[in-house]
């Protein structure tokens, strides 16, 4: 009976030893992978930062282009349409001054168009 107990003890110790060796090997592998991955990580960080800078510049450039496009659209409007734009801008400025919620552009534009299309009495 003692022989069976000794054999079970050896099997248990072998299992524990296998786990310990597995943990040690895993730690070694993780350390090696970490060392190999560090330069790649640093390069990725640099690439992300460079890309973010490029996106910021593109957004700034886009804003400049959009202003030019907006001016072209405004130049193409009739006097009446430009007056509607002025009124909409005045309403936005007033709402901002009151620190109110922003005016819903679609609703305001729809109202202005309806008023424009309504026959005068």
Image (spheres, rainbow, N blue to C red):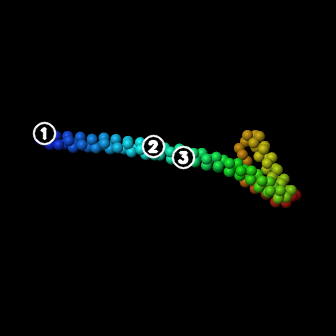
- The front one of 60 and 27 is 27
Left or right: residue 82 compared with residue 47: right
For label 3, the crowd category at 10 Å Cα-Cα, with few meaning under 14, some 14 to 19 and many 20 or more, is few
N-terminal-most mark, 1 or 3:
1
Q: For residue 116, which quarter of the picture?
A: bottom right
Say which element carries label 3: helix
Question: Residue 73 location, x and y as percent?
Answer: 79, 57
For label 1, the crowd category at 10 Å Cα-Cα, with few meaning under 14, some 14 to 19 and many 20 or more, is few
Question: Residue 67 location, x and y as percent?
Answer: 76, 51
Question: Residue 62 location, x and y as percent?
Answer: 71, 52
The residue tagged 3 is 43
Left or right: residue 33 compared with residue 98: left
The residue tagged 1 is 2
Question: Residue 4 location, x and y as percent?
Answer: 14, 43
Q: Is residue 89 visible?
A: yes
Write the residue at 55% across / 45% down: 45
Q: Is residue 104 visible?
A: no
Q: Quadrant of the C terminus?
A: bottom right
Say which element carries label 1: helix
Write the residue at 23% across / 40% down: 13
Q: Which mark is residue 83?
A: none
Q: Which mark is residue 35?
A: 2
Q: Quadrant of the N terminus?
A: top left
Say which element carries label 2: helix
Q: Are marks 2 and 3 in contact (CB under 8 Å)?
A: no
């Amino acid at each position: 009976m003692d022989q069976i107990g000794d054999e079970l003890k050896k099997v248990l110790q072998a299992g524990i030893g296998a786990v310990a060796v597995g943990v040690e090997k895993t730690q070694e592998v993780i350390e090696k992978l970490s060392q190999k991955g560090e330069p790649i990580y640093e390069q990725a960080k640099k690439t992300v930062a460079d890309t973010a800078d490029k996106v910021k510049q593109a957004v700034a450039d886009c804003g400049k282009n959009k202003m030019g496009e907006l001016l072209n659209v405004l130049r193409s409007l009739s006097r009446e349409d430009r007056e509607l734009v002025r009124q909409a801008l005045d309403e936005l400025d007033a709402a901002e001054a009151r620190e109110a919620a922003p005016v819903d552009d679609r609703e305001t534009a729809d109202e202005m168009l309806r008023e424009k299309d309504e026959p005068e009495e």
